[in-house]
Image (spheres, helix red, strand yellow):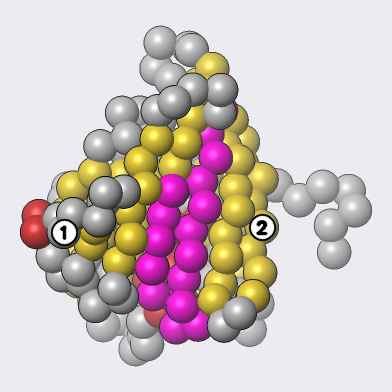
């Protein structure tokens, strides 16, 4: 997580055989400066990332990347980014929602670790790089599952609902449901 607090409003829906994610994140940087960021993600029906755009609201800063779905990434100008070759998923630092992408995309066998390469995007400076991550299904229930997530020396158990959406990412994020939530 980037700062002291983060609040996100995220919706996703199916349109024209694509999954579209539209989200706004409000938080604070480590220097307590408030930020407002909008991100949009386009996925195919297999939860493979095809495009991502992040923009600070009220500022010109932003990043926009697209993918062929097979590990070839391009920047806003259409230039191939060889340093991201092989990545299928993305990980945006200020939101747990991007953990949903590989959780929903990959088939899981309990206790079998899967290693993937992702495009990690730092919301603090909008820089991106290839990062290796590991997911292991630890427990599966009717209404939720627990995955162990690992990247470098960082390791945490993430609880997701039956749709793969993060409920609890200890010490970083948790989903709060409003009074009208069902």
Task: Assign the C terminus to one quadrant of the image.
Answer: bottom right
Q: Earlier in the sequence, mark 2 or mark 1?
A: 2
Crowd around label 1: few <14 · some 14–19 · many ≥20 (10 Å)? some
- From this view, report whether residue 84 is shown above or below residue 171: below
Q: Quadrant of residue 163?
A: bottom right
**Circle 2: is it few (<14), some (14-19), or many (20+) Cα within 10 Å?**
few
Residue 176 visible here: yes
Q: For marks 2 and 1, give the CA distance.
A: 29 Å
Q: Nearer the viewer, residue 95 or 146?
A: 95
* Location of residue 139 in the rendering, given as x and y in whole percent from the top left corner: 45, 77
Q: Name the residue rendered at 60%, 41% in the picture.
A: 24
The structure residue drawn at horizontal position 50% and vertical position 82%, both measured from the top left corner, is 45
**Element class at badge 1:** loop
Say if 76 sits above or below 57 in the image: below
Question: Residue 80: which numbered mark, if any?
Answer: 1
The percent position of residue 131, horizontal first and vertical second, equals 18, 54
Residue 129 coordinates in the image, percent (x, y): 18, 47
Residue occupying image coordinates x 88% and y 48%: 179
* Residue 112: image location, x then y, percent: 26, 82
Does the image show residue 169? no
| Residue range (magenta) | 36-53
Q: Quadrant of residue 126?
A: top left
The front one of 2 and 41 is 41
Please check the rendered image and state whether residue 72 is part of the magenta-colored stretch, yes or no. Answer: no
SS assignment at label 2:
strand
* Whether label 2 touches label 1, CB < 8 Å: no
Q: Report the mark closest to the observer, 2 or 1.
A: 1
Question: Looking at this view, is 145 or 29 the one in front?
Answer: 29
> Residue at the left extreme?
82
Residue under label 2, please give it.
Answer: 11
């Amino acid at each position: 997580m980037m700062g002291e607090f983060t609040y996100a409003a995220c919706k996703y829906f199916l349109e024209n055989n694509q999954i579209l994610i539209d989200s706004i994140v409000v938080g604070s940087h480590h220097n307590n400066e408030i930020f407002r960021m909008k991100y949009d993600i386009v996925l195919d029906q297999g939860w493979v990332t095809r495009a991502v755009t992040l923009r600070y609201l009220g500022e010109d800063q932003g990043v926009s990347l697209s993918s062929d779905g097979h590990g070839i990434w391009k920047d806003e100008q259409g230039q191939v980014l060889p340093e991201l070759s092989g990545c299928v998923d993305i990980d945006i630092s200020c939101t747990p929602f991007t953990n949903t992408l590989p959780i929903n995309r990959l088939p899981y066998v309990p206790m079998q670790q899967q290693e993937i390469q992702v495009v990690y995007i730092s919301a603090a400076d909008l820089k991106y790089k290839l990062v290796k991550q590991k997911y292991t299904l630890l427990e599966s229930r009717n209404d939720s599952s627990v995955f162990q997530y690992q990247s470098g020396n960082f390791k945490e158990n993430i609880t997701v609902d039956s749709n793969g959406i993060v409920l609890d990412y200890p010490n970083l994020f948790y989903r709060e449901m409003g009074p009208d939530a069902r």
